[in-house]
Amino acid sequence: MLAAGPLTISQLAFRLGIPRQLVHYHVKHLQSEGLIRVKDVVKTGRRVSSKAYMLKQGAVLAVADPYEVEKVSAWLEHYYVRNVRNMSKKSRTAKNPSIELPLFFYHLMRLCSNPGMDAGGLFRIYGERFAEDVIIKNVHPNDSRGSGFKMFGKALLLFKEFASANLAMMNENGLIHFRAFLGSDVYDSRVDEFIHSVLRRLVNAYLGGRFVVHKFPPNGKTYSYIIKRTGVKEL
């Protein structure tokens, strides 16, 4: 609306059919973000004047389309089920099964740029599902030999294989560090969310509630994580 011409808060409220106070709140927020500006002061009565706002030049307000969000989410789910969830089955015959996860990431990052898509939430959800659907199902769940840590180690190596990752460190102190992931050493917070979700699910599956996995350091821009025993106080 504001792209077409300046409007006052009252005019916006009337056209949108929502309370004036709600419009005022959003207008002030958009103004603080530098997306709209006061174009003019309009007289709306003998002693009453109102500010007319308009969109700043070059500013773009993206509004989520619920139908588009639903359509994109459905397409991603279909792609995941068809190409990623069955990676374990394909691995017996495909020449390069590890290409499936990078391709899925490409589509996930591309589609998450759409308005209304919760990028962090999607990477977290698909991380948990990838751990369950692909990794855990391929670590021979009926094999009771070995400790939980041994099975976790097998799962981690399988994750490394499927994700074309460079697992630089996995030591007795519980520190896990990926030098690269999906063939890239460039840090991306969305990829970080995915890896962290995978590790959380694997820790829960093989080590139980006695252990948790954290970022290390907490705000570091690296793919580094540490497994800690719960209930242990730090010095």
Image (spheres, helix red, strand yellow):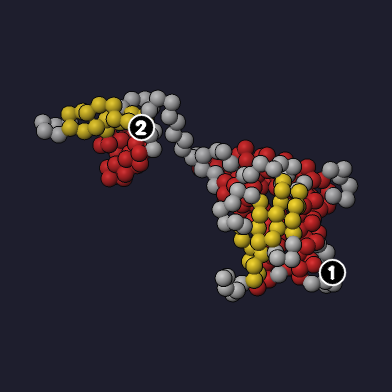
Nearer to the camera, 125 or 64: 125
As drawn, 190 above or below 46: below
Q: Is residue 129 visible?
A: no
The vertical placement of 151 against 26, above or below, is: below
Q: Amino acid at mark 1?
A: Asp
Of the 4 image quadrants, the one containing the N terminus is top left
- Looking at the picture, does residue 86 appear above or below residue 41? below
- The correct choice, above or below, for 106 with respect to 235 in the image is above
Q: Amino acid at mark 2?
A: Ile
Read off the residue under disc 1: 143
Q: Secondary structure at mark 1?
A: loop
Q: At which x and y percent is residue 218?
A: 57, 57
Q: Within 10 angstroms of label 1, few (less than 14), some, or many (20 or more) residues?
A: few
For the C terminus, the quadrant is bottom right
Residue where numbered disc 2 is placed: 36
How far apart, in angstroms, are the residues tagged by discs 2 and 1? 62 Å
Q: Nearer the viewer, residue 129 or 207?
A: 207
Residue ID at (70%, 64%)? 174
